[in-house]
Amino acid sequence: MTPRAPGIVELRGVNRTFSDGTVAVENLTLGLRRGEFLSIVGPSGCGKSTLLRLVSGLEVPSIGSAEVLAERVGYVFQDPTLLPWRTVRRNVELLAELERVPRAERRRRAAAAIRMVGLEGFEKVRPAALSGGMRMRASLARSLVLEPDLFLFDEPFGALDEQTRERLNDELQRLFTLRGFTALFVTHSVTEAVFLGSRVAVMSGRPGRIVREVDVPFDYPRSAQLRFSPEFGRIAGEVSNTLRDQVTTRSVAGTASHSEG
Amino acid sequence: MSDPPSTDGGPPALPGSTSGWRRRPLPRTMLPSRWLPPTVMFLLFVGAWFFVSEVVLSERRQFLLPPPDAVVQVAFLDPVNRAPLLSALLLSAGVALAGLAIASVLGLLVGIVMSQARWLERSLYPYAVVLQCVPTLAMVPVIGFWFDFGLASRLIVTVAIALFPIISSTLFGLQSADPRQHDLLTLHRAGRLTRLVKLQLPTAMPAILTGLQVAATLAVVGAVVGDFFFKQGDAGIGVLIDLYRARLQSEQLFGAAILACLLGIAAFSAFGLLNRMITGGWYGSTGYDRPT
C-alpha cells in the first residue's frame, strides 16, 4: 500500500435525503485508495450505515456523486444474516450460487473460506447451533468466497462480547494482510477502529459528514499487544476526543461509552 | 426447563465448540411432565361425561348424552354400526384431503402472487377476506344450484373454508424475510424467482405449515358440513350424523361426532409433526443463543 495507490471509492459532496425528509448524510466527501483499511467512527444514527449503502449501490445519492471502481464488493452486516435452514457450508456458498459459480468451484472456495475463518468441522451445522462469534465467522466466510476487492463492514462485531470481538479483530487484520483487499469498516468502538484501520475517519452527528481523518501508521500484521502501546493510546485518544466533541455538540445520549479502550 | 445432567444422548461436542448443543437425557415423550397432565385431563373429562349422563340425566333423558361406554359399545364395537361409520369416515377423510390439497395449491399461488407487488396485494386481499367472512352455510343453496348436490359441491365447500388461513399465512410468511437478507440478494442481482425460492419461501415455511395445520382441521369441518347439504353419492360422516340425529340414535350420533373429531385431530397433529420435522432444526428452542 503506497499513498499514491489508485482510488477505488470516491464520494463527492454526497447528500442523501430519505422520503420522510430525514437527511442521513450531508456534503459527504470521502476517498479510499486501493489496499487501504479505512475505519469510520461516529455517534449512533449519524448515517454510517447509509454511507456503506451508498458505496455498495444499495442507495444512490440525492445530490453529489458516488464513484466505486471495485469489481466485487463484499458486504458484512451487523447481524450475521445467515439463512437458518442452510448449513454453514450451504450458507457460505450462497453468494457464489447467486453469481452462478459452478458447483465444484463453489465447493472448493467455500471449503477454503471456512478454513480461513476457522470453522472447519462445523460445515454441516445450522446457524442455530453456533455461538454469536461463530455465526459472524460464517458470515465473513460467505463474503470471502467471492474474493471481493472491496469489503464493507457495518459494525460486524458490535453485538459480540469484548474477548470475542478482539479475537475477531486480530483475525480480520490477519486476513486483510493476507488477502490485500480494500476495507471500509464502520464501528463505534474507537479501539477497534484504530487497531484495524490504516486510517480512521470520524463522522459528525446526523446529518453525517467526515469531520476529521487520522492516519494510523502501524504496519500490518499488527500484534494483539499493539493495543497497549503508548502510540496506540495517543491515536485512540485523539479519535476519542474528536468523537466526544461530536457527541456532546449533538447531545446524543449514551453513544460514546464504547470509546474507552 | 432445566436439563438434568446426563451421560449420554447428546451429540459429541465438536472441537472448539463453545455452546449451542443441548443434551437430550430422555426422549421427551417419556417424561412424566409430558404425558401426565393430558392423561389426568382426559380422565377428568371422561369422568364428567359419566357423571352427567348417569347422575344428572334421568334414564328417560339419557339419550341427550349417552354414557361413554354405551357409545363405544354401540358405535364402535357393534359391526352393524361400525362398518358404515368407518366407510363414511374414509370418504370424509378423502374429501377433506382432496379439498385441502386444492386449497393448498390455490392458497400458495394466491399468496405468492400477492407477495409480488403491493398493488396486487391491495386488489386481491379484500376478496380473500370476503371469502372468509361470507357465511358459507348461507351460500350452500347457491353452490348446490351451480355445482349440483354431490361430491363436487362438498369439495367446493371444503376448499372455501380451508383456503383463507393458507393465503394469509403464506403472504405473512413471504413478507417476513429480514430486509438485510433482501439487501444481500439485491447486491448480487437476484431476480424475483431466485428471491422467492432461496429466501422468501424457506422463510415462510414455518408460517405456511402452521397455516396448513389450521386449514387441515377446517377442511375436516368443511367435509362434514358439506355432507349435511349435499347428500347425493356415497355417505360421509356428516350424512350419517344427520341420519342418526333424525332417528334419535344418539350413541351412533356421538360415535360419528367423535370420529369426525379424531379425524381433525389427526390432521392437526400430522401437520404439526411435519412442521417440526422440516423446520425443527432451523431455530434454537429459545431463539438465538447468547454469544459466547
Image (cartoon, coloured by chain):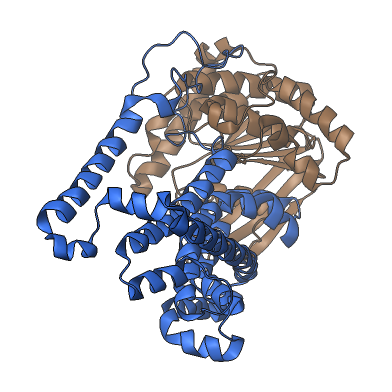
In this rendering, does residue A255 appear at all? yes
Residue B42 position, x and y percent, is 28, 42
Q: Quadrant of the N terminus of chain B?
A: top left
Question: Which sits in the foreground, B105 or B96?
Answer: B96
Q: Residue A245: x percent and y percent?
A: 40, 40
| Left or right: A240 in relation to A123 | left
User: Between residues A90 and A8, which one lies in front from this camera angle?
Assistant: A90
Q: Tag count in the figure?
A: 0
Q: Compared to A94, does A219 lie above or below?
A: above
Q: Please, is residue B42 above or below residue A26 in the view?
A: above
Identified at 38% across, 39% down, the residue is A255
Chain A, colour shown: brown
Say above or below: B211 vs B132: above
Q: Which chain is blue?
A: B
Q: Position of residue B22 (x, y in %)?
A: 47, 22
Nearer to us in this view, B101 or B247: B247
Q: Position of residue A118 (x, y in %)?
A: 67, 19
In the image, residue B64 sits, relative to residue A184, either above or below, namely: below
Task: Identify the residue shown where x is 56% and y is 44%.
Answer: B274
The reply to whether residue A36 is in sight is: no
Horizontally, residue B199 falls left or right of residue A225, namely: right
Q: Residue at x 50, y 61 (%)?
A: B84
